[in-house]
Amino acid sequence: MRSAALSRNAAADAVCARCNGGTIKIYSGTRPATADTALSGNTLLATGTFSATAFGSASNGVATANSITKESSAPAGGTATFARMYTSGSAPVVDVSVGTSGAELTINSTTIIVGLEVLFNACTYTQPDGT
């Protein structure tokens, strides 16, 4: 199956709208198989807050997050391995990769130090085209 660009955009926009006013949490440890899989042995390193409109409109199936409020004081230290986006009601939406470049969520450093701030530089969501 291959989706038309308009269909991919609509799907991406629907997923991203679930993040409006929600959070994105960075974790250490092994990334779960799906965003529905409970966290196990993961440490919460930082939390960012999405704006009321979390993402701009998708183009070619890719949506880019609007400004994400930084974590002012990391609750734990460790190496960031993935992030999970949540609705404003704390329901999981999607898991994304984390890195300083080339990842779905880019942050200032993947080495998180307890008590220091964590900047959320950019975040994108890409709707698969079914291929």
Image (spheres, rainbow, N blue to C red):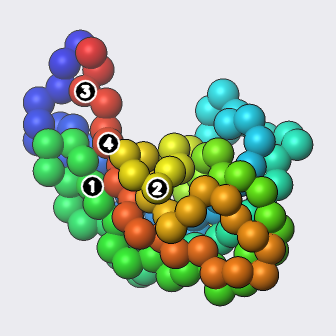
Residue plotted at (70% across, 65% down):
112
Q: Is residue 130 above or below residue 52?
A: above
Q: Quadrant of residue 2?
A: top left
Q: Which amino acid type corresponds to the residue marked 3 in the rendered image?
A: Asp
Q: Which residue is mark 1?
A: 63
Is residue 90 left or right of 115 when viewed as pictured? left
Mark 1, Cα crowd under 10 Å, few <14 / some 14-19 / many 20+, is many
Q: Is residue 107 left or right of residue 65?
A: right
Amino acid at pointer 4: Thr
Q: CA distance from mark 1 to mark 4?
A: 7 Å
Which circle's residue, 3 or 1, is located before the other in the chain?
1
Lower sequence index among marks 3 and 2 = 2
Q: Nearer the viewer, mark 3 or mark 2?
A: 2
* Front residue of this view, candidates 19 and 67: 67
> What residue would you read off at disc 3?
129
* Residue 78 visible to the viewer: yes
Q: Which residue is mark 2?
A: 100
Secondary element type, mark 4: strand
* N-term mark: 1 or 4: 1
- Is disc 3 in contact with disc 1, using a CB cutoff of under 8 Å? no
The quadrant the N terminus occupies is top left
Residue 130 appears in which quarter of the rendering? Answer: top left
- Residue shown at 60%/56% (left/top)? 110
| Pointers 1 and 2 in contact (C-beta within 8 Å) | no
Who comes first in sequence, dot 1 or dot 2? 1
Structural distance between the alpha carbons of marks 2 and 4: 18 Å
Tag of residue 126:
4
Rendered image: mark on residue 23: none
Task: Tell me whether the residue at label 3 lies in contact with that at label 4, contact meaning CB atoms closer than 8 angstroms.
Answer: no
Q: CA distance from mark 1 to mark 2?
A: 19 Å
